[in-house]
Image (spheres, rainbow, N blue to C red):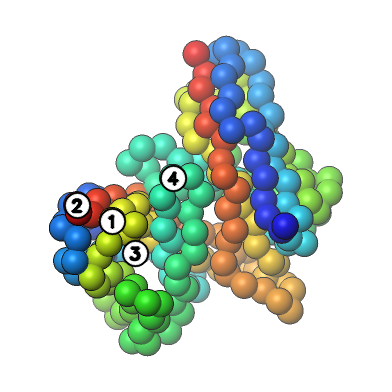
């Protein structure tokens, strides 16, 4: 059974801190790993990672994939209250042309002013 | 504006009734998806469709049905056979893996919160 596990489940930090969120996976037919941010309702796309060791960066957010360790991290530096959200990791699987995303449970990040 | 709409935002039903959730997109995407979100469970795939008139079961399809008669629309019916239907339902769309403009990014609708009592 395909599995995506995120840790920690919940994290509370002060504004200005740096956080690292983890995602590990045990799947067959891995294609890519994606990160989403979910604030109130719908998730919004952050990054897609396909190659190991190549960092993707967007402002204060960055992410990297380690295919050997079957994991990815999402870093947020100089956190702000607007970063408070659930961060979802998803793995894109490809099986004979059928592609689907399998999601982790998410990490709930709370930034205290 | 391009996007995905889901209606209604909140839906209340009595146990034993079928209910249909609407999902419409004007992004010209071939692929559409339905997910269910429960606390502590992340998003779980119910059904997906990569082209009109074709759809596949996801991980938790039992008790649900879908249709894909038009590219823009992918309604989900929660039947009375679904044992625990109260949840937050999210619809998403993306370009098709077979298309030249394929992107793995999925665009999500605002969701429908279904409560069955």
Quarter of the image that includes the N terminus of chain B: bottom right
Q: Nearer the viewer, mark 4 or mark 2?
A: 2
Contact (CB < 8 A) between labels 4 and 2?
no
Q: CA distance from mark 2 to mark 1?
A: 7 Å
Q: Is residue B108 visible?
A: yes
Q: CA distance from mark 4 to mark 2?
A: 18 Å
Q: Residue A25 bears which disc, if any?
A: 3
Sequence-first tag of 4 and 3: 3
Image coordinates of residue B76 in percent, x first then y, are 67, 36
Q: Which residue is mark 2?
A: A112
Image coordinates of residue A25 in percent, x first then y, are 34, 64
Sequence-first tag of 4 and 2: 4
Instruction: Give the residue at x 49% y 36%.
Output: B88
Q: CA distance from mark 1 to mark 3?
A: 29 Å
Q: Is residue B96 above or below residue A69?
A: above
Q: Are marks 1 and 4 on the same chain?
A: yes
Q: Which residue is mark 1?
A: A81
- The quadrant holding residue B12 is top right
Q: Nearer the viewer, mark 4 or mark 3?
A: 4
Instruction: Give the residue at x 15% y 58%.
Output: A14
**Please, which chain is the residue tagged with disc 4 on?**
A
Q: Which residue is mark 4?
A: A40
């Amino acid at each position: 059974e395909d599995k995506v596990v995120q840790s920690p489940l919940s994290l509370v930090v002060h504004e200005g801190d740096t956080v690292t969120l983890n995602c590990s996976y045990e799947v067959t037919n891995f294609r890519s790993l994606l990160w989403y941010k979910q604030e109130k309702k719908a998730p919004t796309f952050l990054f897609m990672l396909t190659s190991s060791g190549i960092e993707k960066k967007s402002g204060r957010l960055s992410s990297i994939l380690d295919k050997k360790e079957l994991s990815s991290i999402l870093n947020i530096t100089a956190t702000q209250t607007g970063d408070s959200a659930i961060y979802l990791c998803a793995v894109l699987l490809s099986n004979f042309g059928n592609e689907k995303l399998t999601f982790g449970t998410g990490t709930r990040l709370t930034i205290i002013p | 504006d391009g996007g995905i709409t889901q209606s209604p935002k909140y839906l209340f039903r009595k146990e034993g009734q079928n209910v249909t959730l609407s999902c419409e997109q004007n992004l010209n995407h071939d692929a559409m998806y339905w997910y269910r979100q429960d606390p502590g469970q992340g998003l779980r795939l119910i059904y997906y469709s990569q082209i009109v008139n074709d759809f596949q079961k996801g991980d938790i399809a039992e008790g649900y049905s879908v249709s894909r008669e038009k590219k823009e629309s992918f309604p989900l019916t929660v039947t009375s056979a679904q044992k625990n239907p109260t949840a937050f339902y999210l619809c998403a769309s993306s370009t098709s893996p077979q298309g030249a403009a394929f992107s793995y990014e999925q665009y999500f609708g605002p969701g429908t919160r279904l409560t069955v009592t």
